Image (tube, rainbow, N blue to C red):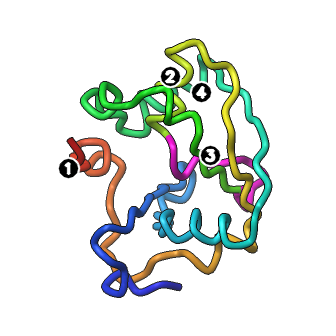
């Protein structure tokens, strides 16, 4: 576990709140991506779907001003998809890229599929437990 106060301010984190238990998991996604590069984790192509796009817009706090800033270059950077303990997959970084690529005709995207054993060490501790409402109403601060 990574203490929250040890993270540089420039590092991005992602919070997932389990829909069944309500338990939050906070992940240091900047560090996970750096680890994927360090170990040369291969990229795969994942499908981009209308349902996935709608879910991202509804549940992931997609900010329109950030979408407007993206260009086709965002497709060069892999999405960060975590293999979750319940057998599902969780998009932990690249939500805006997913939505941008889909709405601009993309039907697949580069991604890192990250096994649980690789992302577990990047759980962040020491932050108060957020609620889904608070996360969705927050502002990234990125312009």
Q: Are marks 2 and 1 in contact (CB under 8 Å)?
A: no
Indicate the secondary structure of the residue bearing disc 4. helix
- From mark 2 to mark 4, how far is it between C-alphas? 5 Å
Q: Are marks 4 and 3 in contact (CB under 8 Å)?
A: no
Q: Which mark is residue 78?
A: 3
- From mark 3 to mark 1, how far is it between C-alphas? 22 Å
Q: Which residues are magenta?
A: 83-94
Q: Which of the two labelled residues, at mark 3 and mark 2, occupies the earlier sequence position? A: 2
| The magenta stretch spans residue 7 | no
Mark 4 neighbour density, 10 Å: few (under 14) some (14–19) many (20 or more): some
Q: Which mark is residue 52?
A: 4
Mark 1 neighbour density, 10 Å: few (under 14) some (14–19) many (20 or more): few
Q: For mark 2, what is the residue?
A: 54
Q: Which of the two labelled residues, at mark 4 and mark 3, occupies the earlier sequence position? A: 4
Left or right, 33 with reference to 99: right
Please state the horizontal and vertical placement of residue 72, each as a whole percent of the image: 50, 26
Q: Residue at x 70, y 52 (%)?
A: 112
Please state the horizontal and vertical placement of residue 65, each as a whole percent of the image: 24, 30
Q: Are marks 3 and 2 in contact (CB under 8 Å)?
A: no
């Amino acid at each position: 576990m990574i203490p929250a106060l040890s993270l540089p301010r420039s590092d991005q984190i992602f919070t997932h709140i389990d829909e069944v238990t309500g338990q939050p998991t906070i992940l240091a996604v900047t560090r996970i991506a750096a680890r994927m590069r360090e170990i040369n984790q291969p990229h795969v192509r994942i499908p981009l779907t209308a349902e996935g796009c709608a879910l991202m817009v509804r549940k992931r706090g997609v900010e329109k001003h950030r979408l407007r800033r993206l260009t086709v270059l965002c497709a060069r950077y892999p999405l960060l998809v975590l293999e979750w303990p319940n057998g599902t997959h969780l998009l932990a970084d690249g939500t805006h890229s997913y939505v941008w690529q889909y709405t601009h005709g993309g039907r697949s995207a580069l991604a890192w599929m990250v096994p649980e054993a690789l992302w577990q060490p990047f759980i962040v501790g020491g932050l108060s437990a957020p609620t889904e409402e608070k996360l969705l109403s927050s502002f990234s601060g990125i312009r």
